[in-house]
């Protein structure tokens, strides 16, 4: 149940969902934040937040200071010396604004424009106005059962052009009670590892300036009580629905108050807003859990599955990349297709190397027509062979990029992101196409549309293999140049919307050198994302665990790789690869023509089992039982919504010679019901309190998987 209440006498707003309340109040004309946390009965709580003047703290009030009150959307230069959410430069050069409550209304959630949005219903809009500069601020709040989606819109009502120097999607003040900040960090092939630190006075920021949400920091953070665990305690999660350069920060002030904030990274940002124009920020998703991190995750997962991510079938794919790299021809691919069909693969995906003159990564991005040296008969024979086996065909593309050595670059050297003086920096021998330029966008729309119309393709892997460097466009000018990165992102979203709307039956998988663009903005168009180039199941267990903090397993695509990982050389047994790399959308990514039959038979039968539990994995609730970040075990349990069926994986990541027996305690079963777990029957209370014994037996990386079913 969600509610939006306004109490006119107290001038108080209260939003609530299943288990949270979010309360604001207008006082002295300003919108103040009072409370966000576990659901409380609507009450006038304002006197529980006493106000008084603080020393060295500018104030227009008799009883309060700008530097200490909880401003719902703090601005620059009026006595609040903490982090500010908004900085507007007006035509006089002044950076001062003074936004006061104007009015509010409850509307249906506005339709999505260019930025990706969650679907939603009733939305509270609070309008603030600076009557001196004649600028309006609209603060949007959509409550869901699981959390709140916020965003902000600036409307320039004046007759002068203004410049937005910083505009956050949200700001939130809360008291620090030994809280900790938790976030996801890493690198290429080591994405989304969990990190946390105590919140102390000062500013802590995670951010990206790469034009993508990045491998290095994910646009997600959580604030948790010090003793909160996976299954206990208060945790607040924040996730930006944005795929470009972002910033999320926590500022702890002199009175031990935390100010959380986030949105577009303003480090290289400025937006020109002409008279009567508006600017809308990306959305941010706020989720509160009083039952620890695991519940927080399931709330995020449900919110995204129900309101953001398209419901699709996730096929088992065979991906050609780690098997052939650039070295293939029609004959080799046909052999692979035949073999993949025998294993139960549902979609054969031809990765990089099929187009232009592409023999390695130095050429041809932009030339999206078949490489006739490798595939003289085009894609048709491959697609027909797939059809013959009742399989679908998928294709890799990297539309946002251009190789220096390409026909497209010969024709349009001015189509890359650059300024007029410097030679752009190369990365993987490629430049970034200027998606702020309409001509480029139209070219891409037509090219991709033709490719997907002329070929029977059911799956597209959409890659993006470098970061943005020159944040300049030859089409922008002195006033608008710092808009480049955000305009680029809007260009990507426009292109994705156009293509995914045109081809609703194609499954688009996102990718950016593995997991460099895993965020809710991308999930709006890509129901699954290639989470990392690192297939090694031991590394992958951490990547999946960290990613699952806010993204559902149904989006975390993984493939069963070679015995020796191509990314880090680690050797792992097949059963471990099978257990970890099938915890979401899955596939095979090694040379199946070289392998001995016994292991292929194991893969075949395991993929059969996977097909039986696929719906459970995609739709079920996740319980993280053992964290690879905290010990040598990884364990996940997935239960269907009715809690009658489950899948349990336990892996030992390290050898402890002659070590102890671990008991893995299951969660959320009915204590009084009995469950068949592999070949044994136990009560739920036994499985949850005694647990399943697990001991490392012999050799590297032991694994145990269990199927669980309620006995009727
Ligand atoms: C990226 C992807 C890989 C593969 C290569 C192809 O690195 O993450 O899976 O598609 O590009 O060049």
Image: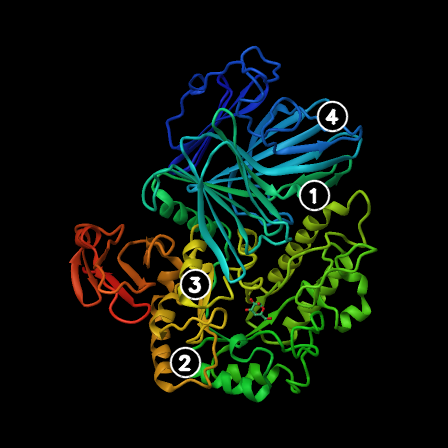
Task: Pick the residue in front: 236 or 117.
Answer: 236
Confirm if mark 3 falls within 8 A of ligand 1. Answer: no
Q: Which mark is residue 269?
A: 1
Name the secondary structure under disc 1: loop
- Across and down, in percent, residue 499 comes to 63, 62
> Real-space Cα distance between discs 2 and 4?
67 Å
**Is the C-beta separation of discs 3 and 4 under 8 Å?**
no
Query: As drawn, is 609 to the left or to the right of 674?
Result: right
Query: As drawn, is 700 to the left or to the right of 267?
Result: left
Task: Residue at 55% x, 87% y: name it.
Answer: 332
- Res 316 visible: no
Q: Of the residues under marks 2 and 3, which one precedes in the sequence? A: 2
- Across and down, in percent, residue 275 comes to 78, 35
Residue placed furthest toward the bottom = 331
Q: Which residue position holds label 3?
A: 540
Name the secondary structure under disc 3: helix
Q: Of the residues under marks 2 and 4, which one precedes in the sequence? A: 4
- Residue 65 sits in which quadrant? top right
Q: Which mark is residue 343?
A: 2
Label 4 crowd (10 A; few <14 / some 14-19 / many >=20) = some
> Real-space Cα distance between discs 2 and 1?
50 Å
- Across and down, in percent, residue 411 comes to 81, 69
Q: Which residue position holds label 4?
A: 133
Name the secondary structure under disc 4: loop
**Is the C-beta separation of discs 2 and 3 under 8 Å?**
no
Ligand 1's image quarter is bottom right
């Amino acid at each position: 149940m969600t509610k939006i209440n306004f109490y006119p006498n107290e001038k108080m707003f209260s939003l609530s969902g299943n288990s949270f309340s979010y309360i604001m109040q207008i006082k002295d004309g300003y919108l103040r934040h009072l409370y966000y946390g576990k659901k409380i009965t609507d009450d006038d709580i304002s006197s529980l937040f006493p106000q008084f003047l603080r020393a060295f703290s500018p104030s227009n009030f008799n009883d309060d200071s700008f530097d200490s009150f909880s401003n719902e959307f703090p601005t620059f230069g009026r006595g609040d010396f903490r982090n500010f959410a908004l900085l507007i430069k007006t035509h006089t050069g002044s950076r001062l604004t003074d936004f006061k409550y104007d009015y509010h209304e409850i509307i249906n959630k506005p339709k999505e424009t260019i930025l990706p949005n969650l679907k939603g219903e009733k939305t509270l809009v609070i309008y603030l106005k600076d009557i001196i500069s004649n600028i309006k601020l609209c603060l949007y709040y959509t409550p869901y059962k699981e959390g709140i989606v916020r965003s902000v819109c600036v409307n320039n009502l004046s007759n002068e052009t203004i410049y937005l120097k910083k505009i956050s999607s949200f700001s939130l003040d809360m008291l620090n009670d030994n809280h900790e900040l938790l976030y996801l960090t890493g690198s290429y092939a080591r994405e989304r590892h969990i990190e946390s630190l105590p919140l102390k006075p000062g500013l802590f920021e995670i951010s990206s300036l790469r034009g993508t949400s990045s491998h290095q920091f994910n646009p997600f953070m959580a604030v948790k009580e010090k003793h909160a665990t996976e299954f206990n305690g208060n945790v607040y999660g924040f996730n930006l629905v944005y795929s470009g350069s972002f910033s999320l920060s926590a500022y702890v002030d002199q009175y031990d108050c935390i100010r959380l904030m986030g949105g577009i990274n303003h480090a290289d940002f400025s937006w020109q807003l002409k008279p009567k124009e508006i600017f809308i920020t990306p959305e941010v998703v706020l989720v509160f859990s009083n039952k620890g991190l695991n519940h927080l995750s399931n709330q995020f997962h449900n919110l995204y599955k129900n309101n953001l991510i398209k419901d699709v079938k996730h096929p088992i794919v065979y991906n050609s990349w780690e098997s052939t790299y650039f070295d293939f021809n029609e004959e080799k691919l046909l052999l692979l297709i035949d073999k993949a069909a025998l294993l139960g693969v549902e979609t054969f995906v031809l990765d990089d190397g099929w187009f232009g003159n592409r023999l390695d990564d130095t050429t041809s991005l932009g030339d999206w027509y078949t490489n006739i040296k490798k595939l003289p008969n085009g894609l048709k024979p491959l697609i027909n062979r797939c059809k013959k086996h009742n399989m679908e065909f998928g294709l890799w593309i990297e539309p946002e990029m251009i190789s220096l050595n390409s026909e497209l670059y010969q024709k349009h050297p001015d189509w890359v992101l650059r300024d007029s003086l410097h030679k752009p920096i190369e990365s993987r021998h490629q430049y970034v196409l200027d998606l702020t330029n309409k001509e480029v966008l139209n070219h891409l729309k037509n090219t991709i549309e033709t490719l997907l119309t002329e070929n029977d393709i059911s799956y597209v892997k959409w890659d993006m293999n470098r970061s943005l460097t020159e944040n300049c466009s030859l089409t922008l000018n002195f006033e608008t140049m710092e808009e480049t990165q955000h305009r680029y992102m809007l260009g990507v979203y426009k292109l994705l919307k156009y293509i995914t709307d045109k081809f609703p039956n194609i499954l688009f998988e996102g990718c950016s050198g593995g997991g460099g663009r895993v965020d809710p903005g991308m999930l709006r168009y890509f129901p699954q994302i290639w989470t990392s180039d690192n297939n090694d199941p031991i590394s992958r267990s951490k990547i999946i665990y960290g990613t699952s903090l806010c993204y559902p397993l149904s989006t975390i695509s993984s493939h069963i790789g070679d015995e020796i990982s191509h990314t880090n050389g680690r050797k792992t047994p097949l059963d471990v690869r099978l257990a970890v790399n099938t915890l979401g959308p899955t596939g095979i990514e090694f040379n199946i023509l070289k392998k001995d039959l016994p292991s292929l038979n194991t893969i075949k039968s395991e993929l059969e089992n996977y097909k039986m539990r696929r719906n459970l994995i995609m739709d079920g609730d996740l319980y993280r039982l053992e964290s690879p970040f905290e010990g040598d075990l990884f364990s996940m349990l997935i239960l269907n919504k009715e809690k009658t069926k489950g899948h349990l994986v336990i892996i030992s990541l390290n050898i402890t010679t002659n070590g102890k027996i671990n008991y893995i305690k299951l969660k959320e079963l009915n204590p009084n019901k009995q469950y068949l777990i592999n070949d044994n029957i136990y009560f739920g209370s036994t499985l949850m309190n005694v647990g399943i014994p697990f001991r490392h037996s012999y050799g590297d990386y032991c694994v145990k998987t269990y199927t669980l079913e309620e006995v009727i």
